[in-house]
Amino acid sequence: MIFEGQSIQCRLRDKGIAEVCFDNQKESVNKFDRNTLEELGKVIDLLKDNNDVKAAMVTSGKPVFIVGADITEFLSLFALPREELLQWVVEANKVFSGFESLPFPTAVAINGISLGGGMEMCLSCDLRVASTAAQVGLPETKLGLIPGFGGTTRLPRVIGADNAFEWIAAGKPKKPAEALKQGAIDALVEPDDLITATENTLLEAVEGKIDWKKRRAEKTSPLQLNKTEATMSFMTSKAYIAGQAGPHYPAPVKAVEVVEKGAALPLEEAIKFEHEAFVDVAQSSQAGALVQLFLNDQVLKKKAKIASKTSDVEVKNATVLGAGIMGGGIAYQSASRGVPAVMKDINPDALEQGMDEAIKLFGKGVKYGKISNEKMAKGIASIKPTLSYEEIKHTDIVVEAVVENPKVKESVLAEVEGLMPDDAIICSNTSTISIDRLAKALKRPEKFCGMHFFNPVHKMPLVEVIRGEKTSDETVASVVAYASKMGKSPVVVNDCPGFFVNRVLFPYFGGFSKLVRDGADFQKVDKVMSKKFGWPMGPAYLLDVVGMDTGRHAAEVMAEGFPDRMSKEEKDAIDVMFENDRYGQKSGSGFYVYGKDKKGRPTKEADPKAYELLKEITADSKDFDDDEIIARTMLPMIIETIRCLEEGIIDSPAEGDMALVYGLGFPPFRGGVFKYVDEQGIEKIVELAKKYQHLGKAYEPTEGMLEMAKAGKKFYQLDAA
């Protein structure tokens, strides 16, 4: 044994091949953390002067290769002063460059997932052999970063600049066949043949049959582009990537700039631009938010994993009550993940619509290469439409998705409970109706909870699992496990009007309504909130999408539940649109008017008639600046979100922020309300709230906010990350 550490073991195999095996003794997967980097440096020092070593082969002792960097450990590094972080990046890169400079050929056997730092380790090797089960890529830009262990600089020298830009900017993992075609790997073999194939490749290099020195020289030399090619490549790529990423995500463009600056230089010099750029993006607010979201997502996954172990019902078959678009979407989501679903309705037309929706979604999966025709056929066959309650007698879970009317739901739930097995779970896909109220209609309220899907079901990741006063822990765990099995991200919330997501959304709409009342142009508000703040759409457009009838009903529920800050004494913009039958997209007009162009594509235009109608409730036109628009719309949402944490409606900032991003499309680069408040500073938010609290109770900071501001606290403390 040459070296034996916690993360890496190195031994000399036959014919002078040193095997450098990544095999973390404390974790189920390999990651690049500080200890691993330190051990790799020690291995390099032991190998470079060892005359018995003729070649080095990098392997993994895990089912995957290396999943990437340990981002939890690096958060504290990102918080260092710039020069300290830069020095750390330089020292870390010396390790990879040191491996690349070993005086003999090196090869890697990529047996599974090799992403981020794992792929950068592979790029440091002369030769790359992959299993057909492998997956490679550089996903750093999804975290607001760029590859910082040499990947941004090495990859273009291996596969060409244009291919490298696509890999880095998109951040998507690549299948080994595509990686082979582009030259990122040199050979592709079956898993059982991987080690032998990699050894044979190295022996050919030792014997001079593969010119590994030439390959290394090409990788460490300037980029092979003439001046004209370089100018065209960089200009085109920067423009395209900037257009795709948008102004709020600077990392992809920064990666192109790194390659451009170092194109004419050898790797050793070019990589210095990567060091500087990595520090720039690592210490940006965008990276801070996106990394936090990644960690928050891990919290949800961990809770779902725990739930699967503590649930008392394993859902093997499901029933959806109520078909149509929503019911069809839920049935599709269940069936597509291997849980057969019965879809029950009293209306044959609704059943047909539900099946059409499911078939359409399966068809899209085939069209985009996500599933096979065989899997589509099997999935469709596992959805059984029925007008009868007979099938419910053997179900594990019922998801009720009938009309949003409490009396109808209570009647349906009570009827169904008497037909299903005693140990089966019943859920309501309600967006506003109290779970405790609905539970009164049931004999087994402990087996009942809310399961709120967001529309469209197949696209929206969030499922709110709503715990009623009598809901058992085992029921919650079972529903969380089922939602996770469906491919969703479940967040458990306690019962209250609007639950969590809708409860915090409607104060945002309230802030918008007051702006319109005071003379703001709804088009400008939409533009500021989408283009500058980063929402997928502004509040007027979102109300049109939600539907003015739905919005008005939900607003009434909120006003009844929280009259001190969500009730209104006067007619507002939503009322005006509703009273004039302008329900939004569903009716063809709302704040905007909707139609189709000559090619059948949907159109959206501001409607002068909307402005005329709004004159009934608005003051004279007034031009509000961007910051005031953001403050007046966002403050009510921010304060209500914090109230939900203080009241225990949500368990943690992490779950609250994920619910907002996954359920409402809160701008990911801002990280959710709690991360946004931390970034802005709670003191600044409190001062803004005090400035606008004359607008009503919705703008008043809570006592908890005042205490946090006084103590200078954050919702996400670094030592708790």
Image: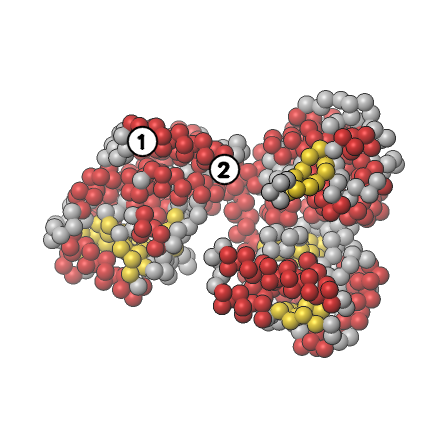
Question: Where does the image place residue 235, in percent across and percent down from the top left?
Answer: 40, 29
Vertical side of 195 occupied by 578: above or below: above
In the rendered image, which residue does mark 2 sit on? 244
SS of the residue at dot 1? helix
The answer to whether residue 530 is visible is yes
| Type of amino acid at the residue the image marks with label 2 | Gln
Q: Residue 273 carries which label?
A: none
Residue plotted at (76% across, 30% down): 608
Q: Which of marks 1 and 2 is nearer the N terminus?
A: 1
SS of the residue at dot 2? helix
Q: Which mark is residue 229?
A: 1
Residue plotted at (16% across, 56% down): 203
Residue plotted at (84% across, 40% down): 580
Left or right side of 125 for 671: right
> Outermost residue toward the right?
569
**Which of pointers 1 and 2 indicates the residue nearer the eye?**
1
| Type of amino acid at the residue the image marks with label 1 | Glu
Question: Where does the image place residue 614, in percent across and percent down from the top left?
Answer: 81, 31
Left or right side of 20 for 693: right
Question: Where does the image place residue 62, in percent across and percent down from the top left?
Answer: 36, 60
Left or right side of 503 for 600: left
